[in-house]
Amino acid sequence: MSPSLLLLVSLTLSSAGKDGKAPRTGDFKDDFLDPPSKATMHYRLRAPEKLPAQNRLGLIVCFHGLHGNEDSITDFAVGAVSRAGLLDQYVIMGGKSKGTGWEEIDDKDVLAWLAWIMKTYPIDPRRVHAIGMSNGGGMVKRFGFRHQDLFASVTSYCGVEVALSGGASGKPPPATGPMSPAETRTEWYIVHGNADKTVDVGASRRTVQQLRVKGYRCIYREIEGADHGGILGNADVADDVIRFLHAVRHKEVAPSKEEKADLASMPAKLKSGKLDAVAPVLAEAERIGGPAAAKAIVAALGNSDADVKKAAAKSIEATSFGREAVVALVKLLKDKSDDVKAAAYRALASESARGSPEALDTLLRAARAKTTPPAERALAIEGLGKTVKLEFLGSFEDKLAIWSLVLLLEDADQKTREVAFAQLEKLVPDTFGYKPDQPEKDRKAAALKWRSWTATKCGPLEKVAGGKKGAA
């Protein structure tokens, strides 16, 4: 058991955990009190009416901004999870800080409160996530970094600037490679508006830079023109946050004993069975998810039955299984079935949008290569479009992917131009008069304007093509 989880268990023996009563469900408010530690928390909690018998639910812990309360971010999270159709899979709770905002003095109470939740509700410890805004966004960055053994993901909306320190002791992990934080630690999602006059956007830009220097995987959404209060109103980003955290599993918290036993038997079943027989096994592998279930999903991707391979790829669209699964997906691009290859491309697009460098590199190569079969090239281009869609709000993170889409507007093949333009045209206010089917002279003139615009957003092509993914 991780150090913070051990601390959580030792901090509290709540009355709710001792009296044998069933946990409260629905949407309610209450006060948590733990006499042994004197920890307290006024909170709001939303739990499914029907609770599973085993620890299967995800947990989203919400932290309000300055002068906020237990409703502030909880309302936001409940709404986004509801739109995703996932309310029956999550406990969502928001607490109220002791003062007007969150400070280190609140940490002890938060830990005890988390311990009570984990003891009282059937929470999967590999699916615990933190979301905060403003002062609460700073809280989840500081507290989340210090207690990475608790959180699979941390999402900070316009968070105040904090130092990212503490957490695991001992030799720091390498910044790159299979043992880097990107492959082994908490994942991050940072959102900020560049018109924020309350917390300057530089606070989040510097957080993203800190995380990347340390080797963490971090998605950054900068929203051009968004102010401090209105940033939560972008439903596209909010929905993406929920898809992201729903896909992520804690990489260091081990599956339960029962799950480990199931995982051990899964590869043999998924490697050779037909879809009807393996569908429940595949669904359980998807539920467990993360690198722990990678061998199971890789076995399904290697099944000779095309339907099983497609179903396994579909699982990866919703759930991340880590680098091992992405490598197996790439191999499927040589499958004899066009349907299987299409499923693999769609799964790679989801992984790329979640920050997998291997998935993005594969899509870039397939989209740019004139030797890629037209149908596959189109799928790769659509995958790049999915990867960068929300970046056009203002962050322009995957600069080479954006440049690649723009350069494909000049491709000799009209169908390729059409697919590339379809990814771009709804994301920009001005398409510079470009049409994929217009005369070559007019098309080239418009394409030059596209190049000029892209250089202002992403930097010169020569610099981007010779460097790495741009930082904030």
Image: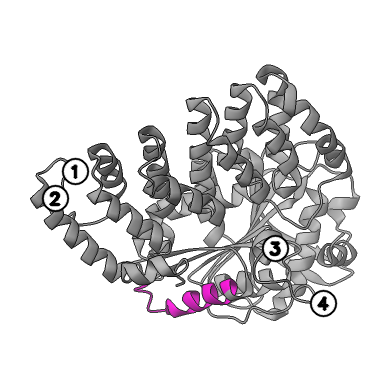
C-alpha separation, residue under disc 3 versus residue under disc 1 = 44 Å
Q: Is residue 210 visible?
A: yes
Rendered image: mark on residue 170: 4
Nearest to viewer (mark 4 / mark 2): 2
Rendered image: mark on residue 289: none
Nearest to viewer (mark 2 / mark 3): 2
Residue placed at 79% from the left, 43% from the top?
Answer: 55
Residue 132 location, quadrant = bottom right
Rendered image: mark on residue 443: 2
The amino acid pointed to by label 4 is Gly
Lower position in the chain sequence, tag 3 or tag 1: 3
Point out residue 273 in the picture as x, y percentages from the top left corner.
73, 21
Q: Is residue 204 magenta?
A: yes
Residue placed at 62% from the left, 67% from the top?
Answer: 216
Point out residue 59 in the picture as x, y percentages from the top left corner.
68, 52
Q: Which residue is mark 3?
A: 185
Closer to us: 333 or 206: 333
Q: Where 147 falls versus 388 (above or below)?
A: below
Mark 2 secondary-structure assignment? helix
Residue placed at 51% from the left, 41% from the top?
Answer: 84
What span is colored magenta in the figure? 194-212
Closer to us: 298 or 10: 298
Lower position in the chain sequence, tag 3 or tag 4: 4
